[in-house]
Image: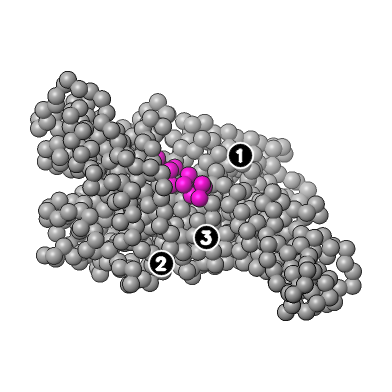
């Protein structure tokens, strides 16, 4: 049995734009309007109306415009949002509040902060038998909207990743502390499941003297076993885990590592590599809707309750509508962020936007086509059975007669005395409720170089191959992976919230809290190995958090591999600091001082 004590260090999201809000009150009808940076107006609306002011929802309007990043910390209302509404009612005029970066550090939700005791049981052949984890979560001075659920739901659901492990035991204890509350942050417990399992697997391989790739292969859920029900009760509906592993090993030039390690050693640097294989559990809370409306100027307006904060909804949602309806991309407009005019839905959280809102858009698009078939039949005076829809037009089979969808939408506006069985507009609504959580997955490889004289760590190569299901916009998905990997590298090597013994925040500014910058990152090599999901009509699985979920254990495994190669006797955990590494290596490494430059990186290219 392999046992480890792990720390998931306290960090916080750092969007480029701190929170701000404007509250106003209308005395005539006793109604509020809140303009705030949110991840979805509906969730703000629900919390403020149902739990704070206890008022009818029609008396509260939430409006969100452009949001400069969120990553989980803008999911819920904060005390300032409530205070400006109270003040606006008392003063009879709008009240504005703009947060500073220091206020963000002090009082916005932090994330992670867990001490974990974990164990992996194996038989004599290296087959995984059980995973046990006891998790002590520091949730802050009080519980935020979702703080208690992050480990209870997401970590437990995520175990035991892509491995066939029959038994699982997880005990979670929530501890109140004199710190800021814990809330959702990119990964939101899924990165913890990956961290626990992949550190255990790597340590078990080292203790048993088994190649870490071989040990993983022995325990992967096979393709023929999918759909597969995990020990945590999750059903993996699609996936090719061994194919993912093969692809990332090739991309990372796994077998060329020894040559690169020797090149590093010539310059007094210790090179290490780390692998992580993971499955996430995302999306599906609990439903999402989408409206498709046809404007009088020939535009197609798509309304969703999700909220973009940099994910590119304006592009990917419009692309989805353009492809399904055959309308020009530049004619599609995306509308979000106004609780007075939104379909049924929730917010952009948990990698769910394309899964849930995208599926609702697809369903609404199908409804548009079906309505259009009926109306085109009437306008063209042919049977519905004689019509086919392709490339944005309805065609009469066997003839050159057709009508474009956008022209039909305009034509319907002027039609009078339509038969009662025909729709009066092409405007349509789609609603989607997922049958369960979705399971993006991937394999990541990281290589680091350590300078034993200073303890400095450089990430010199990083390769990721992910299965996020159907990819709607490859450029956006690449960006999601890149951003997630950067955040994972940041947590392992740079970031950490610290308090002193009196509860005073020490890391209260960007002078004290390290964020990853371009200089901390190598050129990332990213590729995909998609197997479409069967749980939604467009086959997507979610891509927003694969980067951080895969990178945290990959980077930490690489650091500890380098330490072992350098002669250190014990592994180190997060946060990885130069001092920890220097102390681990100071008495065991003799460093040649003549040469001092970084050795060549892995020969990876972006796939």
Is residue 375 inside the magenta stretch? no
Total marks shown come to 3
| Callout 2 crowding tier (Cα within 10 Å): few <14, some 14–19, many ≥20 | many
- Magenta stretch mostly in which secondary structure? helix
Residue 59 percent coordinates (x, y): 69, 54
* C-alpha span from label 3 to label 1: 29 Å
Q: Residue at x 57, y 47 (%)?
A: 312
Which residue is the site of mark 3? 355
Magenta stretch, residue numbers: 474-487
Residue at point 60% right, 57% down? Answer: 320
Q: Which quadrant of the structure image shows residue 99?
A: top right
- Could you tell me how far apart the alpha carbons at marks 2 and 3 are, in whole angstroms? 15 Å
3D distance between C-alphas at marks 1 and 2: 42 Å
Q: Earlier in the sequence, mark 1 or mark 2?
A: 1
User: Looking at this view, is 394 or 299 the one in front?
Assistant: 394
Looking at the picture, how far across and down is residue 318, in whole percent?
63, 53
> Is disc 1 surrounded by few (<14), some (14 to 19) or many (20+) residues within 10 Å?
many
What number is the disc on residue 238? 2
- Of residue 150 and residue 343, the one placed in the foreground of this image is 343
Depth order, front residue of 200/459:
459
């Amino acid at each position: 049995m392999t046992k480890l004590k792990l720390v998931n260090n306290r960090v916080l999201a750092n969007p480029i734009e701190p929170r701000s809000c404007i509250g106003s009150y209308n005395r005539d009808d006793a109604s509020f309007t809140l303009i705030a940076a949110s991840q979805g107006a509906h969730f703000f609306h629900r919390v403020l109306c149902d739990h704070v002011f206890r008022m009818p929802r029609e008396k509260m309007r939430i409006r969100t415009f452009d949001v400069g990043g969120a990553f989980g910390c803008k999911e819920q209302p904060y005390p300032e949002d409530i205070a400006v509404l109270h003040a606006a009612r008392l003063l009879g005029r709008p009240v504005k509040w703009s947060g500073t970066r220091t206020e963000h550090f002090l009082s916005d939700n932090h994330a992670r902060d867990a001490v974990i005791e974990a164990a992996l049981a194996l038989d004599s052949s290296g087959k995984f038998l059980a995973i046990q984890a006891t998790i002590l979560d520091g949730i802050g001075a009080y519980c935020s909207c979702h703080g208690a659920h992050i480990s209870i739901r997401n970590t437990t659901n995520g175990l035991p990743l892509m491995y066939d492990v029959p038994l699982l035991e997880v005990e979670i204890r929530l501890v109140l502390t004199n710190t800021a509350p814990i809330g959702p942050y990119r990964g939101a417990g899924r990165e913890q499941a990956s961290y626990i399992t992949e550190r255990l697997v790597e340590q078990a391989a080292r203790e048993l003297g088994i190649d870490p790739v071989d040990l993983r292969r022995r325990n992967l859920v096979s393709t023929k076993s999918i759909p597969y029900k995990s020990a945590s009760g999750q059903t993996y509906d699609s996936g090719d885990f061994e194919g993912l592993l093969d692809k990332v090993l090739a991309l990372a030039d796994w077998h060329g590592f020894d040559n690169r390690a020797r090149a590093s050693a010539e310059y007094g640097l210790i090179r290490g590599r780390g692998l992580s294989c993971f499955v996430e559990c995302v999306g599906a809370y609990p439903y999402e809707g989408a409206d498709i409306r046809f404007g009088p100027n020939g535009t197609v307006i798509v309304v969703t309750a999700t909220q973009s904060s940099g994910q590119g909804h304006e592009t990917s949602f419009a692309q989805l509508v353009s492809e399904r309806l055959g309308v020009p991309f530049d004619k599609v407009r995306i509308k979000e962020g106004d609780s007075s005019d939104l379909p049924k839905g929730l917010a952009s959280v948990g990698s769910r936007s394309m899964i849930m809102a995208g599926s609702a858009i697809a369903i609404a698009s199908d409804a548009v086509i079906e309505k259009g078939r009926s109306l085109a039949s009437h306008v063209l005076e042919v049977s519905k059975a004689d019509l086919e829809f392709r490339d944005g037009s309805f065609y009469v089979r066997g003839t050159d007669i057709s009508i474009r969808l956008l022209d039909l939408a305009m034509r319907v506006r002027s039609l009078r005395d339509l038969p009662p069985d025909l729709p009066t507009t092409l405007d349509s609504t789609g609603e989607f409720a997922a049958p369960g959580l979705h399971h993006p997955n991937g394999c990541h490889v990281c290589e680091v170089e350590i300078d034993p004289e200073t303890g400095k760590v450089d990430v010199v190569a990083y390769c990721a191959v992910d299965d996020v299901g159907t990819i709607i916009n490859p450029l956006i998905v690449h960006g999601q992976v890149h951003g997630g990997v950067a955040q994972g590298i940041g947590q392992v090597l740079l970031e950490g919230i610290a308090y002193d013994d009196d509860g005073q925040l020490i890391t209260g500014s960007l002078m004290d809290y390290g964020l990853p910058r371009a200089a901390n990152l190598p050129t990332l090599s990213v590729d995909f190995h998609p197997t479409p999901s069967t749980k939604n009509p467009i086959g997507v699985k979610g891509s927003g958090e694969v980067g951080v979920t895969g990178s945290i254990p990959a980077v930490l495994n690489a650091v500890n591999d380098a330490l072992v190669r350098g002669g250190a006797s014990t592994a180190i955990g997060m946060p990885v600091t130069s001092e920890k590494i220097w102390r681990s290596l100071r008495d065991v490494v003799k460093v040649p001082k003549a040469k001092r430059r970084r050795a060549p990186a892995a020969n990876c290219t972006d796939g």
